[in-house]
Image (cartoon, rainbow, N blue to C red):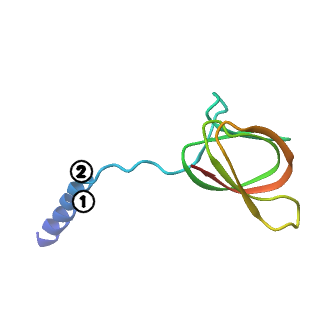
Amino acid sequence: MKRFLTRLAVVAVAGAVAVVLPASSAFAVNRTECRGLGVLLLHNAGGDLCFANAGVQNVAIYGVDRIWTGDNKVTFEYVPKLGAPATSATVDKWRFGNVPPIHKITKIRIW
């Protein structure tokens, strides 16, 4: 009986904490469909990859040659050429451009 009451108390406290604490906003970049002008779009030989929402995500995207930032300020960590050291660049909102093919994008941060 004592064990039952202990478990019941733990469940009640956990439930109370879940009700009292406010829900936090998601802070994670995620892949999305390439619809609308507000998404981050990366183009390579395989087609378009689109991302949305603020946050950071490790990726492995090769051969990017065109970028559209949409409604996103974006920081990329990337390797420009095979064997070159990794570097980073930040691109403001509403920017489009062809870029020299990037060997590999390793991280995306949407602000």
Residue 37: x and y, percent?
65, 29
Q: Determine the residue positioned at 24% across, 50% down.
A: 19
Crowd class of label 2 (few under 14; some 14 to 19; many from 20; radius 10 Å): few
- Mark 2, residue position: 19
87 or 56, nearer to the observer: 87
Residue 6: x and y, percent?
16, 69
94 or 82, nearer to the observer: 94
Label drawn at residue 28: none
Q: Determine the residue positioned at 77% across, 65% down.
A: 86
- Mark 1, residue position: 14
34 or 13, nearer to the observer: 34
How many marks on residues?
2
| Left or right of 102, for residue 5 | left
Residue 99: x and y, percent?
84, 45
Rendered-image quadrant of the N terminus: bottom left
- The correct choice, above or below, for 23 with respect to 71 in the image is below
Amino acid type at image mark 1: Ala
Amino acid type at image mark 2: Val
Residue 8: x and y, percent?
17, 62
Q: Residue 104: which quarter of the image?
A: bottom right
Identify the secondary structure beneath mark 2: helix
Say which label, 2 or 1, has the lower sequence index. Answer: 1
Identify the secondary structure beneath mark 1: helix
Specify whether residue 47 is in view: no
User: Furthest residue to the top?
Assistant: 36
Specify whether residue 104 is in view: yes
